[in-house]
Amino acid sequence: MANMNRLHYFSTISLITLLLFSASCNKSNHNSSLKLAHSLNITHPVHKAMEFMSERVNELSEGQLAITIYPSGQLGSEQQNVELLQLGSLAMTKVSAAVMEGFSDDYKVLSLPYIFKSREHYFEVCDGEIGKDILLSTENKMLRGLCFYNAGSRSFYSNQKPILTPEDLEGSKIRVMNSQTAMQMVSALGGSPTPLAPGELYTALQSGVVDGAENNPPTFYTTRHYEICKYYSLDEHSSIPDVLLMSKIVWDKLSKEEQSWIIQAINESVLVQRKLWDEAENDALQKLEAAGVEISHPNKELFLNKLTELYSTYSDNKELAAYIQRIRELE
């Protein structure tokens, strides 16, 4: 059975690769088309920002370069899309920076709890030299990071009780992303980290496989997890951005002019996305409250004090320790 599942998986990848073969782009003077696939729905602020980016590329290139977007997992899962980028069969995709920990240790620093002291500090890191260094750290894996999109702050929600102190997490099974940093964080706070795919989480909350999870307000609302979890504690333990990725194989085939159109459009889309995100976050919090969710604002210092040892685990990693120092120097 395992062999049959593996065969089916690779057959799916092969089929998608054949369907997307036209996404490869050669240097030329005639029109080129790039495909961008992701798993978000079309109401998400990041999808809307990428739509804006696509429109701007079309305008800047006067129709010479087009980016076609396939949302909602139409062309495969996050993992499949990233693998297609590495093959050069898909041009672009969007993933969480936490997912990228599996491709470069540099990304781990962005998942550290309370690494950012303010919203301005967060943007300064993502937009500056630190962010650029991290984005380019996966080029040896055929993945070129293009920008970071704001994904807000992640907080705990529960179907049992408010999470007001770390002690409230003790014995609780908390769903986390497949991120070593996220698992270490929940363990340090006394909870039991349980990695699950996003699509499995609603049922897992409903059946009691997990007692809670952690995410930003728009995602908590759009996934309808509030129907089960009526307690949302805005401890805002981490601010992990989304990453817009491009296949390095496809990027290297673009002309300098085509690359410049894409870069300008992306830079403009980042600012548009931040405005859209703020609107979506405020709207989500209002709707969650109207749906009967108890929203609390715990003392963040209580959580931070429990997590200081987590930073010491990176002291032996010279590169990550250097990133932490660089980020702190920007405060």
Image (cartoon, helix red, strand yellow):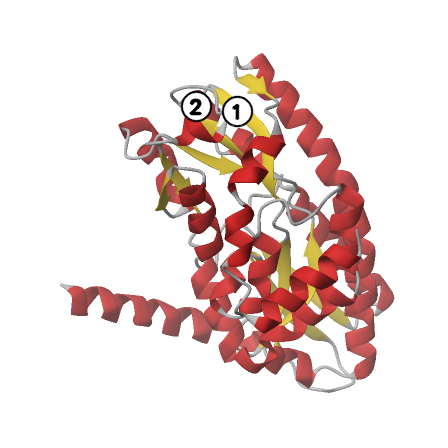
SS of the residue at dot 2?
loop
Query: In the displayed image of the protein, which residue is found farthest to the left?
Result: 1
Identify whether 301 is placed above or below 143: above
x%, y% of residue 115? Answer: 65, 49
In the shown orientation, is residue 212 left or right of residue 274? Answer: left
x%, y% of residue 153? Answer: 63, 40
Tally of marks = 2
x%, y% of residue 221? Answer: 54, 29
Point 70% across, 71% down: residue:
133
- The residue tagged 1 is 232
The answer to whether marks 2 and 1 mark residues whose Cβ atoms lie closer than 8 Å is yes
- The residue tagged 2 is 229
Q: Callout 1 environment at 10 Å: few (<14), some (14 to 19), or many (20+)? A: many
In the shown orientation, is residue 193 left or right of residue 67? Answer: left
Task: Work out how far the residue at label 2 is from the one at label 1, CA to CA, in angstroms.
Answer: 8 Å
Q: Callout 2 environment at 10 Å: few (<14), some (14 to 19), or many (20+)? A: many
Which sits in the foreground, 267 or 69?
A: 267
